[in-house]
Image (cartoon, rainbow, N blue to C red):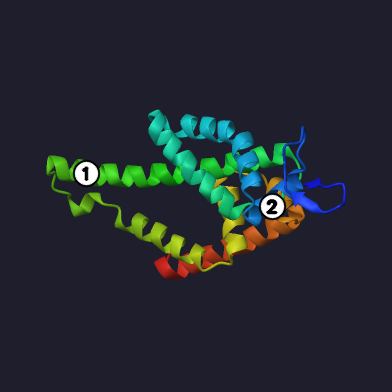
Amino acid sequence: MTITPQGNRESRSFDLIEPAWLEVTREMKQGDPNAFALFYEKTFEPMFSEVKRLVERDEQTTLDIVQDAMLKAIRCIKPLDDERSVVAWSRAVAKSTAYDWLRKHARRKEVSYNDELEIPIDESDVKIPDAARIEWIEQQLLQLPVELQNMIAFRYRIGWSLRRIGQAFGLKTGAVDGRIGRAIRILQEKAKREFHD
């Protein structure tokens, strides 16, 4: 932020040698284009390399996924106080977006492969119980509070440590472990009743 000699706010600028990332991420939340530009400049390369490593596709596909990840990051940005945290968080968003893309792509590829070759699917080959369990679990997770959904996703989808999740949510490691553990135990009990295990 620059100040005129009279002390009035003239315009916001983040062209600093070492940006105040806490302010930058807060300004992003409010829609500041300068903050977006700085975030993009600092995180594009790490996000691109993370997506490229995971999906191993052509450059255009990689760029499309990175673009989706950028949009997701801008929507979900939380106050982060240093460049290392910003880059690590953006990499996690890129990884999550890449995994989502891979899952969708794998499903589409499987369907189109079977259609193209006109292979009859033997119902005995389809693991209906496994598919039903996965769908049931996804539905149950959607009923959890959003913060808890995110904690579970960071823990099991992205592979963050409990300490790192705690830092992201402003909680102690034990509190994160307790919340995730309770949610998993409740889901396990529900699953036993649902599937008669």
Q: Quadrant of residue 15?
A: top right
Residue 104 location (% of width, % of height): 36, 47
> Residue at left 48%, top 42%?
67
Residue 39 can be seen, yes or no: yes
Q: Residues within 10 Å of mark 1 (few under 14, many from 20)?
A: few
Dot 2 or dot 1, earlier in sequence: 2
Between 171 and 91, the one lying in front of the other is: 91
Between 170 and 81, the one lying in front of the other is: 81
Residue 117 location (% of width, % of height): 13, 40
> Residue at left 66%, top 45%?
35
> Residue at left 39%, top 35%?
61
- 180 with respect to 137 (left or right): right
Q: Amino acid at mark 2?
A: Glu
Q: Quadrant of the C terminus?
A: bottom left
* Spatial separation of the CA atoms under disc 2 and disc 1: 44 Å
Between 103 and 57, the one lying in front of the other is: 57
Query: Where does label 1 land, which residue?
Result: 112
Dot 1 lies on which element? helix
Q: For residue 27, which numbered disc appears in the image? A: 2
> Residue at left 74%, top 44%?
21
Q: Amino acid at mark 1?
A: Ser
- 2 with respect to 107 (left or right): right
Please determine whether, in this image, residue 73 is positioned above or below residue 16: below
Dot 2 lies on which element? helix
Residue 166 location (% of width, % of height): 72, 52
Residue 153 location (% of width, % of height): 56, 52
Please determine whether, in this image, residue 117 is positioned above or below residue 123: above
